[in-house]
Structures are given as structure tokens and as C-alpha cells.
Amino acid sequence: MALVSAAICPHPVMLIPDLAGRSDRWDRLRSACLEAVGLLQIPVVGGGLEPSPDAPQLVAIVGGDDATRSFDPAGAYPSLFSNGIRWRSGWGQDAEDPQPLPLTLSLGYWLLVSSRPDGKGIIVADGAFESIDFDASLEDCAALGRDLAGRAERVAMIVIGEGSTCMTASDRVDQAEEAAGYDKAVMRALEQCDADALGRLGENGLAMTGRAPWRVLAGAAAGNEFEGRLHAGGRENDGGYFVASWTRRPSGANV
């Protein structure tokens, strides 16, 4: 049982077209996120689509929040009401125990559903929705990652978090050098699939919503080799947002 792939994406609400309208900037970032999620090979049936035999059996969406919590997939649905935005989606609203997801998981859910080719078919992989406390310890993050990676033979993750883009404008000015250094270290670790480096990105006083979920990813990926791709983050017009994808190398593959 192991992690086989991961998509790492940010959580600006403007990823949702209904909120962003027409914007080249958000269109580019949205396309990068959907490209990364599309590489997870999430199994979809219907509309002439058939899943690959190597498709993941479980898709886990992980994002930071004020508390660590598991959400019941049967009642989970994306909602931005708590962020002051009248937007929600998903059939979970009609469940007996509806559970609105926090911002990070709501964006991850939206990306998952929107990644289907032409919006067709039904996703048949099991789902997991896990928030991790922004201030969770490295040990707690790694433990959640190992737990998620052990829930199925083939596990994919959508990991939602940001670096300095989530800081206030004044903090970005006051801590510009530290933030820039942290962002570069994160981007390098994501591009190189360096789980050890990602897990070691420690307590530096910067308010990064990605720290805990990235550490969860590091815990899930430990002991395996991955190939990485940076879809956004390395160019000035990316706006400081990171988008990356990891795909596990087969055992015995040349590094």
C-alpha cells in the first residue's frame, strides 16, 4: 500500500470561474492546477471513459485549517460561505449530516471534480477529506501522511497549501527576505520530489498555510522515489503560487 501520485495546488478562490470571471492570470493558474490533478489518473467511468488498471483506488484531499479533522465523504461538500462568499456545490449538501468543507478542502474538491475530461463520467475512486491543523507538529503531519498512504494499494493525494501568497501584504514587506527564501526552498523540494527536504521545512515564524499539508505529503511519500513536475511557480507571471505533480517511479527504475 503506497502513495502513487500527488498534485500540489494553492487555494485562491479565483480558481473557480464563477468567481473569477474572465482573467488571463487566473485562467493560467487554473489550467496548471487541472493539469496537475489530471496526471493523477483518477478513475472515471461513463461517457465512453474507462479507468486504467493502475488508477488510484483512493483519492485523499489534504489541506490546512484551524483544526485537524476527517470529513465524511458521504456528506462533505465545498462551500465558501464561512469565507463570506455565497458559493457552494456538491451533492453532499443533501446528505443527512451535511459537512461543509473548509477553504482548502473546498478548492481541492472543486479541482477533483473539474479535472474530469470534458466534465464527463463519474469518479469511482474512494475519497478522503482531511484537514490538518496549520500548527500541527511534524510528527502529527507525518503520521497522517503514513495513515493515508496505507489506506489502499494505490493512493493519490491532492495537497492544498500556499507559501508567502497567504501572508498579509505588510508581513510580506516586513519579512520579504525570509518569505522569498522559504518559497524557493518549497519550490525546489516540490520540483525535485524531495520529501525529506519538504518535511524539514520547519518553524520559521512565517504564516504559511502549506507547511502542514506539505509535511503530510512528505510523510505519505517517505521511502519511495517520485518524478516531479512544476506546473506553476517558476515564472514571474505565476503570481507566487506553486503547482506541482508527483508520480511514483516503478520499483527498480533508474533515477
Image: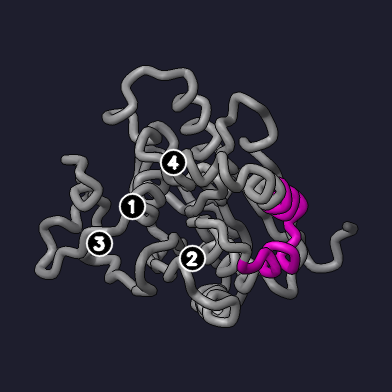
SS under mark 2: loop
Q: Nearer the viewer, mark 3 or mark 1?
A: 1
Q: Which mark is residue 115?
A: 4
State which region is magenta.
Answer: 184-203
Residue under circle 2? 57
Q: Nearer the viewer, mark 4 or mark 3?
A: 3
Q: Amino acid at mark 2?
A: Gln
Q: Which residue occupies 68% across, 41% down?
A: 230
Q: Does residue 5 appear to the left or right of 15 in the view shown? A: right
CA separation in Å, label 4 and label 2: 16 Å
SS under mark 4: loop
Q: In the rendered image of this protein, does residue 72 appear above or below residue 12?
A: below
How would you rate the neighbour count of disc 3 (Cα within 10 Å): few for under 14, some for 14-19, many for 20 or more?
many
Q: Which residue occupies 9% across, 68% down?
A: 96
Residue under circle 1? 103
CA separation in Å, label 3 and label 2: 19 Å
Q: Earlier in the sequence, mark 3 or mark 1?
A: 3
The quadrant the N terminus occupies is: bottom right
Determine contact: label 1, label 4, CB under 8 Å: no
| Front position in the image: 238 or 153 | 238
SS under mark 3: strand
Residue 46, given in percent of the width and then of the height, sits at: 35, 45
How would you rate the neighbour count of disc 4 (Cα within 10 Å): few for under 14, some for 14-19, many for 20 or more?
many
Q: Is residue 9 visible?
A: yes
Q: Does residue 160 appear to the left or right of 120 in the view shown? A: right
Q: In the rendered image of this protein, does residue 26 appear above or below residue 208?
A: above
Residue under circle 3? 76
Q: Amino acid at mark 1?
A: Leu
Q: Amino acid at mark 3?
A: Ala
Q: Is residue 38 visible?
A: no
Q: Earlier in the sequence, mark 4 or mark 3?
A: 3
Determine contact: label 3, label 1, CB under 8 Å: no
